[in-house]
Image: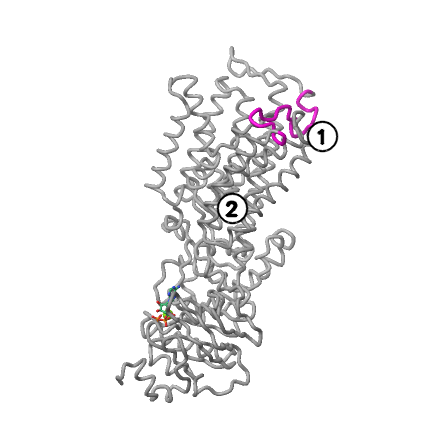
Amino acid sequence: MSEGALPKEDAVLRVDDLQKSFGGLAATDHATFAVERGTITGLIGPNGAGKSTLFNLISGFYEPDGGTVEVNGTDVTGMEPYEVADHGLIRTFQTPRKLEGMTVREAMLVGPRKQPGESFLKLFAAPGAVGESESANLAEAERILEEFEIDHLATQPATDISGGQMKLVELARAMLAEPEVLLLDEPVAGVNPTLAKKLKDQIRRLNEQGTTFLLIEHDMEFVMDLADPIVVLDQGHVLTEGTPEGVRSDDRVIDAYLGGGT
Amino acid sequence: MSALDGVTEAVADLSRPETWVLGVSAAFALFLLAALLTGALGPTYFLFLVGLAGMYALLSFGLNAQWGFTGLINFSVAAFFGVGAYGSALMTADSSPIAGGFNPLVGLVVALVVAFVLALLIGIPTLRLRADYLAIASLGLAEVVRLIVLNERWLTNGSAGLRGIPSFFQGWPVLSSFPEAMPGLRLVVIPGSPILLETAFWQSLLNVALVLAFAGGAFLVLRRAHRSPWGRVLRTIRSDEDLARALGKNTYSFKMQSFILGSLIMALAGVFYTHLNLYVGPGDLDPITTFYAWVAVILGGSGSNRGALFGGIVIVTIREGTRFLNDVALPIDPAPLRLLLIGVVIVAVMRYRPQGILPPQRELIWPSAVDGGGTPEPPDSGVREQKGSGGDE
Ligand SMILES: Nc1ncnc2c1ncn2[C@@H]1O[C@H](COP(=O)(O)OP(=O)(O)OP(=O)(O)O)[C@@H](O)[C@H]1O
Ligand SMILES: [Mg+2]
């Protein structure tokens, strides 16, 4: 569909001809693109372009009207979100999700997948294994919090931290799930420049350690600096895809997204 | 057992509400002791009350495992209670139209199996949907179960109910003849009002032992399950199910487990009731039981096992206290007075302590991981104290 698209040898995520309509509105309109392993891929587009809808389709929250989603070479179309997560894809939400009645570290510990202690039977049959994995996860959670420089928040109520800190915690928690590809929906929306810088550094560092990112972001400076390639979405379909420079100078993008400015 | 655990736990880190609860409980215990010693409260009746308290504690434990842990709205507490009561009565009673005469242990197993199947039947179509579907379906279920019990005479004896139910320990070695074997005792603490301990007393003592075993066991299971990764996923679901799904949790399965677990505990309350009361009838499935369980959980603090225990005791106190008042002093019918009192208590709690009296305090992290890690526990006052109100309506 999009001409800028290069053939992806090693795609961790492949979206093919995906469609989704709400009433008469085609929120996702034959969208096709792929995310190559090891990249930080940006997903941009004006408000209402269908970016979040695309995330919901990919992660199994919405059932597509047509098309397929492939994660790690497996067709995950129509799977439950938890099954998609099992294939290594984790997503965050545009509006931070608050966990009522949990401390930050407690909320973090929801992240690790397939914990032995999540099996009711093992709580009684193998309490030792549960304790070991719990200790390891707690240590890992505290390590990541430290890396993100928010370890002082560990025992704060998760509902009492700032919006920007919430975004950091969400990223940190998603990392505990050890995703191969992590979908971030506007990670720095409403985050002050210092925290945003911190987030950017963290994403870059995690990427160097092997996590692939697909991130939606309206902050152009942030996304142009961090992501390559960038996929541009407009009215539900992929307008173009390319390097930050290529996208920035593309007339169609300027028309659709930058409103003819810049 | 469970009460003791609850007390030691509360003493360990006395926050203000905990001190308050402890104080009130101690005063109440002294009051009961005085009533016992003066003969105002018969010891057998007292044990019956303890049994009832254990029964309500079980019902609130069950509902707490569903609503308090996971946010599942179950309006058919009475139905699961009834399934437990009838399941075991139908297996053991002389007058049972279908089976009867089995050992009460068989009744217990059958009751639990039926409750399990019923929980599955209602859970499968509703737990994938939004929370309100379970609420509506469970309302219907409560009525359906009640009507079946009332109308299917070939199965349940209909409005006549079931008589001739044996005590739970019938047919057990030693215990089955324990009440008769014990000597009648006559204690004189205050001259002129002797306290008689006879067969009925020893029988009640056995019943109390039974309910303490049930409730204590349920409490220990729930406590371990709650402070664990499993309990943490449930709390995540309660707060934001989509987040749990995005993090790879099969929320349908977790909700089902929580629903079944709670339903089994409710059925356990019914089994105990059958062998306490030795008679069950369709009236035992009245929705008031569901109402009491909800009051107990909300009062105690949703999500807190200790709170559920406390709430259960408060319910029995109000229930039997109004009856007592009616007997000795007030010429007021206890039923409306009871509801009035419960109404006042609920309004007061909602107004001054919306999170309940003993809301959950601890982080849901496996104890050995936190205690071993040397990380300090958050202060008592902190974490959930201010925050409990939001999702608890
Ligand atoms: N659940 C839904 N029901 C109906 N319409 C929806 C739903 N979700 C999204 N839409 C519509 O689909 C279109 C795309 O919405 P989406 O949230 O995907 O946009 P977006 O690109 O994420 O925008 P933003 O940058 O503002 O977050 C919008 O017109 C929106 O109104
Ligand atoms: Mg969006």
Residue that mark 1 sits on: B172
Q: Amino acid at mark 1?
A: Trp
Q: Amino acid at mark 2?
A: Ala
Residue located at (47% from left, 74% from top): A18
How far across and how far down the image is residue B314, in percent? 45, 33
- Is ligand 1 less than 8 Å from the beta carbon at label 1? no
Q: In what quadrant of the picture does the N terminus of chain A appear? A: bottom left
Residue B217 part of the magenta-drawn span: no
In the depicted structure, whether residue A190 falls above or below residue B164 = below
Quick check: which quadrant has ligand 2? Answer: bottom left
- Name the N-terminal-most of marks 1 and 2: 2
In this image, B13 relative to A248: left or right?
A: right
The image quadrant of residue A197 is bottom left
Label 1: chain letter: B
How far across and how far down the image is residue B284, in percent? 53, 30
Label 2: chain letter: B
Residue located at (50% from left, 38% from top): B142
Is A32 in front, or is A137? A32
How far across and how far down the image is residue A91, in percent? 46, 69
The stretch of residues the image draws in magenta is B154-180
Residue that mark 2 sits on: B65
Residue B174 part of the magenta-drawn span: yes
In the depicted structure, whether residue B163 falls above or below residue B59 = above
Mark 1, secondary structure of its residue: loop
In this image, B196 relative to A243: left or right?
A: right
Residue located at (69% from left, 28% from top): B170
Q: In what quadrant of the picture does the C terminus of chain A appear? A: bottom left
